[in-house]
Amino acid sequence: MDIANIALLIMSCVVVLANGVVCGLVATRRKLRTFTNGFVVSLAISDILSGGVFMPTSVLVPGSRVNNHVSMVVIVSSTLNLSAVAFERYLAVVKPLSYKMVIKHWFRRLVGLVWGVAIFMSVLPAFWDANVESLIHKVYLSCAVILFLVLPLVFILFVYTFIFIKLRQHGKLLHNLHATRTRLAEARRSKRESKTVKIFFSIMALFAFCWIPVMYMTFTVVANRLDLIPPYLMLVSHVSIMLSSLINPFLYTFMKQDFRREATSLFCKKLVQRRESSKRGIDENSETQVVYTKAPLVTIHNDTDSENRV
């Protein structure tokens, strides 16, 4: 196994670990259980599949049919999850009054639809000879790229552009009004929504950039122009896929306020508990150290206890 494959496997482990942390935070921190973060978890699960199944099989068992099915699940679920997030952000920003009612009705349906379509697309080639030379498989690959890479990215770009325009208009309106408490609170909410949109817009742009090599390779295969694929492009495509899955959880951790706040709170809590446990251990050891002399019994306390008594 060469250095490049070892590096890919290491990246896969980091991808699984990072996205596992995202899922764990949402599962254990009640404040993170929002509809937005529900789609985040769905996307993280897709990234875990990418790092935990897709890349290891690509490296260890190249050309495996299982790898082809998993790659389709990863592609479809990722782009559809990002599309679902864009729809959820549209409702939250543009339709705030009806947001809770609509998203509560559609959340489970959207998540189920995302994974249902992803699984359906992955098993569909089992009904024919999945050979890149066959016409039906070429049609399948072309439709998959157009429907689940190109169109979702166009949809996401359109939705976020529309949201940015609305937020900008809203900000100008607030600026022209007198700053009452209610309007200040509304301005803060609008600022938070704008930051969230920027985060997911960044994710979408990075996703598009990372999957460009895959799109290019797919269309060249369909066009029977394998001579246009450089020998290093397969490695580049694998690295770009891992980068896409690796960047997402770090964006949530360092850019999304609720994730950052809860992660910091959890880390600080664990640190305090560890210090208190260590301190209790020191105190117990100090209290048991007794010096026996002809004088009265003397107990040796640590410095902290002496300072407290003074």
Image (spheres, rainbow, N blue to C red):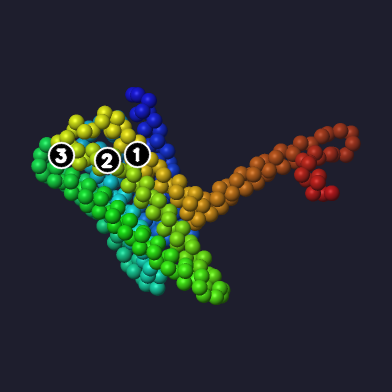
Q: Earlier in the sequence, mark 2 or mark 1?
A: 2
Q: Secondary structure at mark 1?
A: helix
Evaluate if marks 2 and 1 touch, with contact meaning CB atoms under 8 Å apart. Answer: yes
- Where is residue 213? Give x, y as percent: 28, 39
Distance in Å between CA atoms under marks 2 and 1:
9 Å
* Quadrant hosting residue 193: bottom left
Q: Amino acid at mark 1?
A: Ser
Q: Earlier in the sequence, mark 1 or mark 3?
A: 3
Q: Secondary structure at mark 2?
A: helix
Q: Which residue is identified by label 1?
A: 240
Q: Amino acid at mark 3?
A: Ala
User: Would you call the spot at circle 3 few (<14 residues within 10 Å), some (14-19), or many (20 or more)?
Assistant: few
Give left or right: position of 142 versus 281.
left
- Judge depth for marks 3 and 2 and give the one in front: 3
User: Would you call the spot at circle 2 few (<14 residues within 10 Å), some (14-19), or many (20 or more)?
Assistant: many
- Can residue 168 be seen in the rendering of this structure? yes
Q: Nearer the viewer, residue 219 or 59?
A: 219
Q: Please, is residue 238 above or below residue 179 in the view?
A: above
* Quadrant hosting residue 197: bottom left
User: Would you call the spot at circle 1 few (<14 residues within 10 Å), some (14-19), or many (20 or more)?
Assistant: many
- Where is residue 12? Give x, y as percent: 38, 37
- Where is residue 99? Give x, y as percent: 38, 69
Q: Please, is residue 217 above or below residue 183 in the view?
A: above
Q: Please, is residue 112 above or below residue 9 in the view?
A: below
Q: Nearer the viewer, residue 266 or 198?
A: 198
Q: Residue at x 49, y 49 (%)?
A: 254
Q: Amino acid at mark 2?
A: Val
Q: Earlier in the sequence, mark 3 or mark 2?
A: 2
Q: Which residue is identified by label 3?
A: 223
Give left or right: position of 9 versus 68.
right
Give residue 214's mark. Answer: 2
- Judge depth for marks 1 and 3 and give the one in front: 3
